[in-house]
Amino acid sequence: GKSVVPGATIAYSVLVDNVGTASGKATVTDPLPGNVTLSSTPACATVASGDTCSVKVTGTTLVIKVTLARGDSAKATFDAVVKPTDTTTVVNTATITTGPCTSPHCSSTVTNPVVVLSVVKSSTPAPGSTVPRGTRVTYTLTLTDSGTAATTPITLTDKVPVGTTYVSGSATCGSAPTCNATEKTGTVTWAPIIVQPGAASSLSVSFQAVVGATDTTGEVITNVAVFTNDGTPSCTSSTCTTNKVTLKVTAPSSAATHSPPPTSPTLPPPAPPIPAATTPHTGEPWAGSRWLELMVLVAGLGLLASGETLRRRRRAKTAGQ
């Protein structure tokens, strides 16, 4: 009933007792489960004088043969390793196949559920995004146990990434009932966390950080978390690391770039103003002198009067003739 993790070694022992009233012989077979591999040479422990015990492996099945006096017993032992890819419970059954036995003592079964923990890191904005200064980033860690037994209490830590500032009070345990989230000197810790088996029992914890105001364009913000190994595939140490999440910073230009105004075309200098006429123009050469015009007018009138007088004299002379 004790849980195991992929890669763990299970030490098995098969004990055969003669509970009858006379000596006798028996054969016990023990086919190995498909999710383990034999990792040691099976052996029989020392038996009493006159008794015998032998064990051999046929394929993936152990065959144990014993001869026991009344009340005597024999024990065979062997080790098996849980396969690294296993996610199912390890069930091992040994059965008396020859020799008298009394049910329910003709077979014995050992069951070991498996814990397979994985922790996946993500972010909002999404990993690989380009983020401006001042962006608030949410980092999320999703814990899943794809095995058949709950995890042991684990601890999860995550350093606030360089180039960001932790948002005070943002660390949360999500739906983890036994978890406590804290932040100290730039490291966020969630503990203890117990994850129940099955995808439906996945848990998520998170925290927030703000991209720094002095970050430079192209600067990469990297974040990786660390957690207690509890059957995590491909992890052989006591703690494991999550996948890496990166974001790229973009910053505004230090000085706005403006195009110079277009050059105005060169225009000729304006023409000088035309002076206004100071005397009225009548079209005559002497125009512009009022006295001269008046004298001409009087002279004209005088000529008309002289002409009229001459006409009258001529008429009178003609009339007298």
Image (cartoon, rainbow, N blue to C red):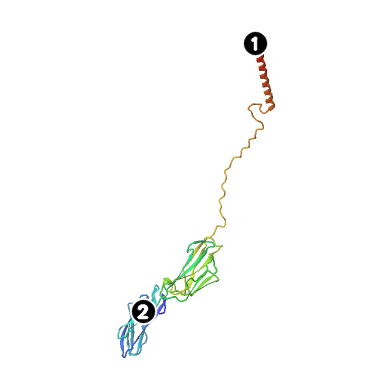
Task: Pinpoint residue 137: horizontal percent, then vertical percent.
Answer: 51, 65
As shown in the figure, which amino acid type bears the numbered disc 2? Asn
Q: Of discs 1 and 2, which sits in the foreground?
A: 1
Q: Answer left or right for 200 relative to 96.
A: right
- Mark 1 vs mark 2: which is more N-terminal? 2
- The amino acid type of the residue labelled 1 equals Ala
Residue at 67% in and 21% down: 301
Residue 70 in percent (x, y) is at 33, 90
Identify which residue, 152 or 163, lies in the foreground.
152
Vertical relation: 318 (above or below) 183: above
Q: Residue at x 52, y 67 (%)?
A: 208
Going 67% across and 23% down the picture, which residue do you hit? Answer: 297
**Which secondary structure lies at badge 2?**
strand
Q: Is residue 56 left or right of residue 255?
A: left
- Circles 1 and 2: CB distance less than 8 Å? no
Q: Secondary structure at mark 1?
A: helix
Marker disc for residue 92: 2
The N terminus sits in image quarter: bottom left
**Quarter of the C terminus within the rendering:** top right
Q: Label 1 neighbourhood size at 10 Å, few (<14), some (14-19), many (20+)?
A: few
Q: Choose between 110 and 46: the one closer to the eye.
A: 110
Q: Mark number for residue 319?
A: 1
Instruction: Quadrant for residue 66, please give it.
Output: bottom left
